[in-house]
Image (cartoon, rainbow, N blue to C red):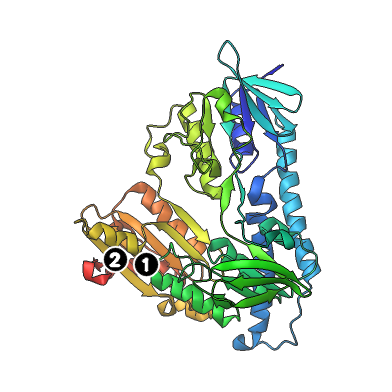
Amino acid sequence: MDSFDSIIIGAGQAAPSLAVALAGRGDRVALIEGDRLGGTCVNTGCTPTKTLRKSARVAHLARRAAEFGVKTGPVEVDFAAAMARMRERSDRAREGLANWLARTDGVNVIDGWGRFDGREADGRFRVSVGDRVLRARQVYLNTGTRPFIPDVPGLETIAPLDNAGLLALTERPDHLIVVGGSYIGLELGQIFRRLGSSVTILHRADRLAEREDADVSAIIADIMRSEGIDLRLNASIASVGKTMRGALVTLADGTEIVGSHILFATGRVPNTEELNLVSVGLTADARGYIATDAQLETDVPGIWALGDVNRRGAFTHTAYHDHEIVLAERDGLEDLHQWKGADQRPTTYAMFTDPPLGRVGLTRTEALALVGQGRRILISDLPMDRVSRAREEGETSGLIRLIVDAETEAFLGATVFGFGGDEVIATLTNFMATGASYRIMQQALPVHPTVAEFLPTILAGLKPLEKADG
């Protein structure tokens, strides 16, 4: 039986950095991974999709070249070359992780699927990997999530795709049907449309990305339709089936849609069911997520859950931040402002459509609910077509929305949807972490010409959010 100071099960975005940091603090660390280092982000998520998104954006800009006074011939996409570029980038990122871990003293990467196997008499946890049994006093879970495909009648007759399967294609889909009009479905639908596929998006709700404000959803829909994407809202699937041309989707109202490929972008589920949590007295909720305290420790002392499995944000950046919180607690820094724990950080993310959507904290809809409870809140909006840099770039879709607490003057939320939104949101997220008054940002000196330079101007237009505004 092998003894370690710390065992990490799953090598997603929190794990490699945590393993190296723990080794640097003197731990002997076992990092267990049953698939590929880097988790979803490096292999089937952020790294490959953002690489492919660039190819799609270049093709889109080439088609718009005449708007900028540039003449081009017919634009053709070499799908195989774009996919090869994507895979090369992903492979290099994964190899970089492997090399980093291999040259770090104290880190032992173990291939295989790890699961708990009870505890030793001295309290150490046992973790089995195949025929091998490891033991340690500290175990960190970073097993991530996987795509969820609903049980649709006829599903067994077709070859449904998830995001991993879509990115493994070697030939461009003629007509891609995307089931799910939220973040992943919208990103991939737009990418493949720009790469030359016909795209239909089926969404069960009455608007896309329904967690966002209604006006934001409307702008997203306008952008998708402007690029020739067929949107079917309030679409309930009755069945799917195989045809000579690919796959047939029949909606509840009898509408039939034929496509060459079907992508299900219908959510994700945590990879916890094979961990044998019960053997160490740990339980997951009905959906498989593991509860933690603000420092990411579970109900069982000595076991932490990081990344998607703790349901505190299914994003690479939240997983990475999780490992920093864990280290801060170990180093005795948790009382410092910047390391108070996961309960204090606002939710922040980006949807990498083009243009991108950057979000942090409250939406306008959520703020209105607080106003209904007596909270005093200020809000200010600016359409992106009034931002000079956006006009100069020919990227005028979207808006900027800032939400502030009227009493504390601290930011409560922001939406930056449009050119540079995925970068500008970081300015607001970082500022929110200070808890400072918005007036400090309003008085700051911005750089011209940028999108962010309009933040002080927008703040100057703050006004009370009223119930009637809903």
Q: Residue 445: x, y in percent? A: 37, 63
Using the image, determine if residue 51 lies above or below residue 226: above
Q: Residue 447: x, y in percent? A: 44, 66
Residue type (three-letter) at the residue carrying disc 1? Arg
Using the image, determine if residue 318 lies above or below residue 393: above
Query: Could you tell me if residue 103 is visible in this image?
Result: no
Quadrant in the rendering for residue 24: top right
Quadrant in the rendering for residue 158: bottom right
Specify whether 415 is left or right of 40.
left
Question: Residue at position x 50%, y 75% from top?
Answer: 221
What secondary structure is marked by label 2?
strand
Specify whether 419 is left or right of 382.
right
Question: Residue at position x 34%, y 66% from top?
Answer: 456
Residue that extends furthest to the left in the rendered view of this protein: 374
| Residue 112 vs residue 73, the one in the foreground | 112
Using the image, determine if residue 39 lies above or below residue 332: below
Query: Which residue is disc 1 drawn over?
Result: 401
| Residue 264 vs residue 38, the one in the foreground | 264
Question: Residue at position x 57%, y 51% from top?
Answer: 268
Query: Could you tell me if residue 184 is visible in this image?
Result: yes
Which quarter shows the N terminus?
top right
Mark-to-mark CA distance, 2 and 1: 7 Å
Query: Which residue is disc 2 drawn over?
Result: 379
